[in-house]
Amino acid sequence: MTTTSTHETEITADADVPLVRIIREFDAPPAKVFRAHTDPELVVQWLGPRRHEMRIDHYDCRTGGSYRYLHVSDGNEFGFHGCFHEVRSPELIIQTFTFEGFPDGVALERLVLEDLGDGRTRLTATSLVDSFEGRDAFIASGMEDGVRESYERLDAVLAR
């Protein structure tokens, strides 16, 4: 099922620090958007490009919890893992993120959900890495297309 969203995904690279900022609005209340980010049964339905199957090794989204998952396609596996540093429903998730193909590159990610009223939410996500080169490699990896496609898939999950 493909859902067309009227919301644009804004992705910017900060000029002063090695950070990527993503802003996106959703036609769902913060509690529903938060649940879609914290419930592994929902996460597998939207996180990542459609061409990948997502397999969760573990996903314990709570303060002090951790996660590991794989994106699998065409016989290739791409692993990701991290720790949840702060999880506060329905407004905040702070976590680390590591692509196992580049294990020294750890991003600190902060996801904030803002209630816009009328059942709408603004998501602001920031990913801070240790260098501008790392940030630029992150962007060059195709993450922009993956983020946009993931959020289109999230629209469909939230519409149910």
Image (cartoon, grey):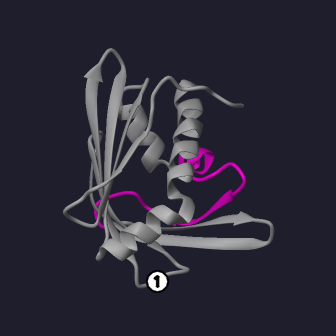
Q: Can see residue 59?
A: no
> Is residue 87 one of those drawn in magenta?
no
Q: Residue furthest top?
A: 118
Vertical side of 47 occupied by 75: above or below: below
* Front residue of this view, candidates 70 and 64: 70
The range drawn in magenta is 41-64
Residue 129 at x, y = what percent?
A: 31, 71
Vertical side of 54 occupied by 7: above or below: above
| Amino acid at dot 1 | Pro
The residue depicted at 51 percent of the width and 49 percent of the height is: 147
Q: Can see residue 56?
A: yes
Vertical side of 152 occupied by 37: above or below: below
Residue 20 at x, y = what percent?
A: 33, 57
- Residue 137 picture quarter: bottom left
What secondary structure is found at the residue carrying circle 1? Answer: loop
Residue 13 at x, y = what percent?
A: 32, 56
The residue depicted at 26 percent of the width and 33 percent of the height is: 114
The residue depicted at 35 percent of the width and 69 percent of the height is: 107
- Residue 57 picture quarter: bottom right
Residue 41 at x, y = what percent?
A: 58, 48
